[in-house]
Amino acid sequence: MKVLVPVKRVVDYNVKVRVKSDQSGVDIANVKMSMNPFDEIAVEEAVRLKEAGKATEIIAVSCGVLQSQETLRTAMAIGADRAVLVETDVELQPLAVAKLLKAVADKEQPQLIILGKQAIDDDANQTGQMLAALLDWPQATYASKVEVDGDKVKVTREVDGGLETVQLSLPAIVTTDLRLNEPRYVTLPNIMKAKKKQLDNFKPADLGVDVTPRLKTLKVSEPPKRSAGIIVPDVATLVDKLKNEAKVI
Ligand code: AMP
């Protein structure tokens, strides 16, 4: 079973991003970039499936700027066998990514595609769902457990107030939630090994996909600053302020 794992290069989750002065987006110049955390979980899950003898080959794929190669090398250091970069400088939106991934899936014919539930930069939570629609494959989002059995995959999903278990026929799409696994640390020998693994490079035009943006970001702004709190002398004053100033009770 071939497993395809789309991985996105995003601003590292530890970085406190700053909005550009013209409010057109966030400043990513000289900012640390890393693999989207949910995609790391997806790669880890694919590697565990391979270690368990369920998957035979893992292909990591990233769409974006040339530097996304670094993200793909990390995926190969975790255990992906080879990688595909769809290189473009155009700012990609989820529909464009889903179309590119569909084209890669048509070429590679994987049985399972594991994506992150969302990218922590755009917080779109759309690509997996759109890809499932384009491929006309079943999908299970927010996976906290994935069990492959023959031509089926059983997925436990985190839903409001509990867990839901669904069974899908392969080929299928799964998107990862935080509790699916804890990705392993990447070791130096594996980083060295990853440098020698195959990394193919395509352009969107090679795949016949038009990636022109369909949405325009009108404005990005910082969350409102929190004003300082006050200490009230007693409960009666607190209740009075909640009732008459904050008007919340
Ligand atoms: P999003 O719909 O943007 O929140 O992203 C959801 C998931 O789609 C991510 O966790 C990735 O697995 C995948 N994805 C999104 N953008 C890209 C990209 N440019 N390259 C590869 N995979 C991506």
Image (cartoon, rainbow, N blue to C red):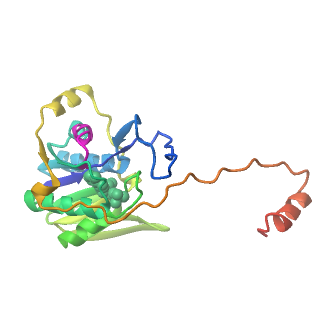
Residue 64 painted magenta: yes
In percent of the image, x 79 and y 64: which residue is there? Answer: 246
Please indicate, yes or no, whether residue 203 appears anywhere in the rendered image: yes
- Residue 219, percent across and down? 49, 58
Taking the image in four quarters, ligand 1 sits in the one at bottom left
Of residue 29 and residue 198, the one placed in the foreground of this image is 29
Q: Is residue 62 above or below residue 30?
A: below
In percent of the image, x 16 and y 67: which residue is there? Answer: 170
Residue stretch rendered in magenta on the structure: 63-73
Q: Is residue 25 left or right of residue 239?
A: left
Q: Is residue 90 left or right of residue 192?
A: right
Q: Is residue 165 above or below residue 118?
A: below
Q: Is residue 237 above or below residue 65?
A: below
Residue 133 painted magenta: no
| Quadrant containing the N terminus in the rendered view | bottom left
- Residue 220, percent across and down? 50, 55
- Residue 9, percent across and down? 31, 45
In percent of the image, x 14 and y 61: which residue is there? Answer: 103
